[in-house]
């Protein structure tokens, strides 16, 4: 029998975080049943509440990154508010923040201070550049992570200016790595009673995202082949690339070294590529950019002679890896996305209508994920303070002081 409470039911998380890399780790925990308490500035809130596409009073950015969490407003410049935060930390398993280095300590929620209050606390700290490099004190964002870690070059097109991608891959990869790192530390804390600080960064996460491609580049000590992913060795090359069909609709292929020549035979490309200067030898791409461009141009010409459905049918029937290239809107309607619940529709009570949102990237057999909705500013302040023992009069006094 499944447990509707979620795999992280019973875990309490307190966060002083904003933006994307700082909030998504804990939104994912909320999806899995954790109680996540988000600290916001009274009357102002997280500035990302107005980012992205606005639908009524909802922000696509804030809703995506903060669903299922609770909103508590605290003016941490006042001792009364700082006292509340520390009382919460005593009851928490995890604390998260992504302030610029040094700011957490000034506001009373640095790791050393919170560790004294709760030695078992797992403290997640997200920065732009990492804690030890020369730029560790600087602010940063997703574009910085993509640029500094090599992602921008990896997705560049030869002859065109480099640019960061539309998707926030540094933010999201940092969020996912923070999620995993913090939960690993939580397992250790539950076994030993000893918490710890877990530090991640946009740059470090984006660099990890480059995976073996970065390792290969470092070992070769020269830039990767861009415009398509041609990898392996001169003797055993593979390729991942996109090509347009006769109607201009793109498809993606990825052939490892074992698949390259059988795929050419299936497609009927082997003979025309061989006759055009031996371009069936993919290893030529390692010898020069001119060779690489000639191979890609010939493949583009050949894929342009028929429809995407034609090529995909041949390749998939032959056990090769190929798929249509979706636009973002097409991806949201793709049956592989929809039927796996990677996108879903929920009824949003504040809009009075259904909206499309991310579903869950996991399928738990016993404790299914339960995505929620993002909170109104200060929506849970009275509830949370009540759980700490504050009565109605005490809460009213805190409001008069401007502490909450």
Image: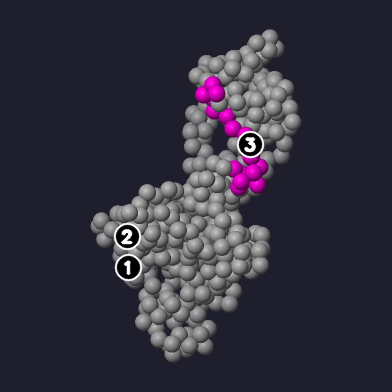
**Residue drawn at 55 percent across, 26 percent down:** 316
Q: Residue 30 at what x, y percent from top left?
A: 44, 61
Q: Is residue 364 visible?
A: yes
Q: Which residue is mark 1?
A: 118
**Residue drawn at 55 percent across, 77 percent down:** 42
Marks 2 and 1 sit apart, C-alpha to C-alpha, by 8 Å
Q: Secondary structure at mark 1?
A: loop
Whether residue 65 appears in magenta in the rendering, the answer is no
**Residue drawn at 48 percent across, 48 percent down:** 361
Q: Image height check: is 76 above or below 27?
A: below
Q: Secondary structure at mark 3?
A: loop
The reply to whether the C-beta atoms of the residues labelled 1 and 3 are less than 8 Å apart is: no
Q: Is residue 297 visible?
A: no
Marks 1 and 3 sit apart, C-alpha to C-alpha, by 50 Å
Q: Nearer the viewer, residue 79 or 272?
A: 272
Q: Which residues are magenta?
A: 317-334
Q: Image height check: is 87 above or below 121?
A: below
Q: Secondary structure at mark 2?
A: loop
Q: Nearer the viewer, residue 256 or 371?
A: 371
Q: Residue 320 at what x, y percent from top left?
A: 54, 24
Instruction: Residue at the far front: name it.
Output: 1
Whether residue 328 appears in magenta in the rendering, the answer is yes
Q: Quadrant of residue 354?
A: bottom right
Compare marks 1 and 3 and give the one earlier in the sequence.
1
Q: Is residue 125 left or right of residue 227?
A: left
Compare marks 2 and 1 and give the one earlier in the sequence.
1
Q: Which residue is mark 2?
A: 195
């Amino acid at each position: 029998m499944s447990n509707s409470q979620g795999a992280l039911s019973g875990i309490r998380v307190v966060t002083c975080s904003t933006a994307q890399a700082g909030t998504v780790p804990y939104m994912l925990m909320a999806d899995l049943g954790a109680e996540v308490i988000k600290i916001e500035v009274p009357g102002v809130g997280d500035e990302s509440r107005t980012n992205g596409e606005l639908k009524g009073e909802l922000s696509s950015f804030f809703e995506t990154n903060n669903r299922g969490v609770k909103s508590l407003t605290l003016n941490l410049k006042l001792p009364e508010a700082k006292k509340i935060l520390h009382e919460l930390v005593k009851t928490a398993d995890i604390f998260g923040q992504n302030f610029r280095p040094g700011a957490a300590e000034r506001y009373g929620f640095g790791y050393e201070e919170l560790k004294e209050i709760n030695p078992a606390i797992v403290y997640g700290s997200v920065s732009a550049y990492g804690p030890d490099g020369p730029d560790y004190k600087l602010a940063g964002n997703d574009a910085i992570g993509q640029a500094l870690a090599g992602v921008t070059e990896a997705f560049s097109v030869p002859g065109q200016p480099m640019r960061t991608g539309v998707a926030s891959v540094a933010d999201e990869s940092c969020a996912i790595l923070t999620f995993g790192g913090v939960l690993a530390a939580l397992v250790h804390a539950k076994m030993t009673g000893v918490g710890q600080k877990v530090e991640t960064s946009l740059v470090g996460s984006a660099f990890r995202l480059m995976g073996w491609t970065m390792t290969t580049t470092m070992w070769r000590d020269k830039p990767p082949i861009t415009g398509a992913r041609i990898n392996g060795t001169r003797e055993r090359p593979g390729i991942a690339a996109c090509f347009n069909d006769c109607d201009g609709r793109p498809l993606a292929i990825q052939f490892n070294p074992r698949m390259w020549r059988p795929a050419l035979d299936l497609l009927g490309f082997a003979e025309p590529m061989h006759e055009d200067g031996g371009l069936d030898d993919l290893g030529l791409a390692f010898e020069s950019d001119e060779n690489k461009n000639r191979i890609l141009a010939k493949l583009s010409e050949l894929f342009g002679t028929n429809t995407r459905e034609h090529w995909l049918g041949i390749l998939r029937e032959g056990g090769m890896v190929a798929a249509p290239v979706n636009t973002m809107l097409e991806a949201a309607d793709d049956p592989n996305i929809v039927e796996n619940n990677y996108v879903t529709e929920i009824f949003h009570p504040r809009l009075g209508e259904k909206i499309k949102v991310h579903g869950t990237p996991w399928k738990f057999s016993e404790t299914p994920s339960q995505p929620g909705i993002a909170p109104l500013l200060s929506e849970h302040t009275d509830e949370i303070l009540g759980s700490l023992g504050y009565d109605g009069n005490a809460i009213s006094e805190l409001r008069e002081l401007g502490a909450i």
